[in-house]
Image (tube, rainbow, N blue to C red):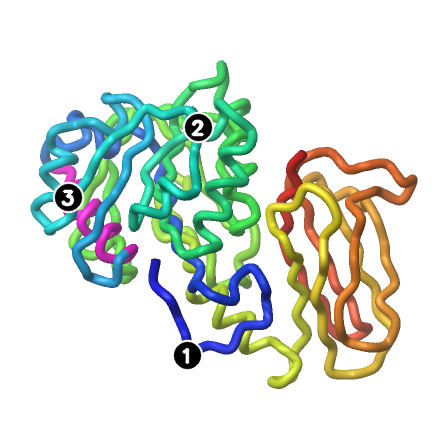
Amino acid sequence: MRILSSLLVLIPCLAYANPGRIVVNYDDWTVSSTGFNAPSTPGIYVGNIAAWFTGGEAGSFLGLGGSFHLGAPELYSAFAAFGHTYVRSEADSLDLGVLQNYDGVFLGAKPLGDKPANVATLTTYVQEGGNVYLYGGTNYYGSIAADAIVLNSFLNPFGLDFASAMTVYRGTYPLEGDHPVLAGVDYLFTDNGTAISDLDPVDASNEVLAWFMGDGVVAVYDGLLAMTSVRASDGRTGGPFVRPYPNPASGSVSIRFARTAPAPGSLRIYDLAGRLVRSLALGEAAGSMTWDGTDSAGRGVAPGVYFLRLTNGTRDETARLIFVR
């Protein structure tokens, strides 16, 4: 984990570590042995991802999943060629202490879905500086829609989303772009894939980097940009912010907020489908408030992704919260 001491951060859960990064890929076949066939260049792609995760330093990486998806000899060689170590595990329970021994974790739906607490563990890992490579295009739980529910329970709070239907296409696809993850990567391989979309295009921390046949095929979340955005929008520099803690949450949530003008405001909580769950009055002073995890009828909300919408009369800001039980 790389500690960032130069930024002043007001969010308790991020006070000691720079949030990590996420790379999201269209399909699991991309780094399989088949994916390494010419003209595809997944070895360069993997090297770029590792360098982006570590800041160019030698690192250690963990693959969580089956031998087909993350056990290709070519994948081991690609990490080694760039000076990294790579090991694979088929563990079905994610332990934060174990994950934090690695600079990055590569995985798909299966390790997340086997135990609900795994999503919360992986989310905390990223919030505390860990890095994740997440792939779609599988069918672990009977359908792409079922896989998407599992994957998006982790991914949505970071501003990205997997589609609930598969794009049928087997072959290589070209890539181009100026992001470090794509540097020198000419083609990647897919055997059917799952499109990736950006839930909040205005937010610079989450971005779809490459498209093929109208589908997002590579996307990223950059925790450093997310942190910079928080600092640039706090009360000292003229903008409002809203941040929930803890996130993920399983009970009451402390919500920090600030405004530049003493205008009455509200905090509205929506579910992933856009339905209003709860509306709370903020009053006139900047500070914090607590949401007890219930809807407007006093019922505990279901596990899932929620959006906290702060309104102060002149500007709005949205934060994402994942709720687990």
Q: What whole-number distance in Å separates the C-alpha atoms at marks 2 and 3?
A: 24 Å
Residue for point 49% across, 37% down: 162
Please state which amino acid type lies under the numbered disc 1.
Ser
Q: Mark on residue 205? A: none
Please state which amino acid type lies under the numbered disc 3.
Phe
Q: Answer with left or right where residue 138 lies relative to residue 232.
A: left
Q: Position of residue 164 (x, y in %)?
A: 53, 29
Query: Mark 2 highlights which residue?
Result: 93
Q: Position of residue 244 (x, y in %)?
A: 66, 57
Looking at the image, which is closer to me, 113 or 181?
A: 113
Magenta stretch, residue numbers? 39-53
Mark 2 surroundings within 10 Å by alpha-carbon count, few (fewer than 14), some (14 through 19), many (20 or more)? some
Please name which of the two marks, 2 or 3, marks the residue nearer to the observer. 2
Q: Mark on residue 79? A: 3
Figure quadrant of the N terminus: bottom left
Residue 132 lies in the magenta stretch: no
Residue 211 in sight from this viewpoint: no
Looking at the picture, does residue 5 appear above or below residue 151? Answer: below
Q: What whole-number distance in Å separates the C-alpha atoms at marks 2 and 1?
A: 35 Å
Classified by dominant secondary structure, the portion drawn in magenta counts as: helix
Residue for point 75% across, 64% down: 310
Q: Answer with left or right where residue 93 lies relative to residue 301.
A: left
Contact (Cβ within 8 Å) of mark 2 with mark 1 = no
Q: Mark on residue 6? A: 1
Q: Position of residue 213 (x, y in %)?
A: 37, 38
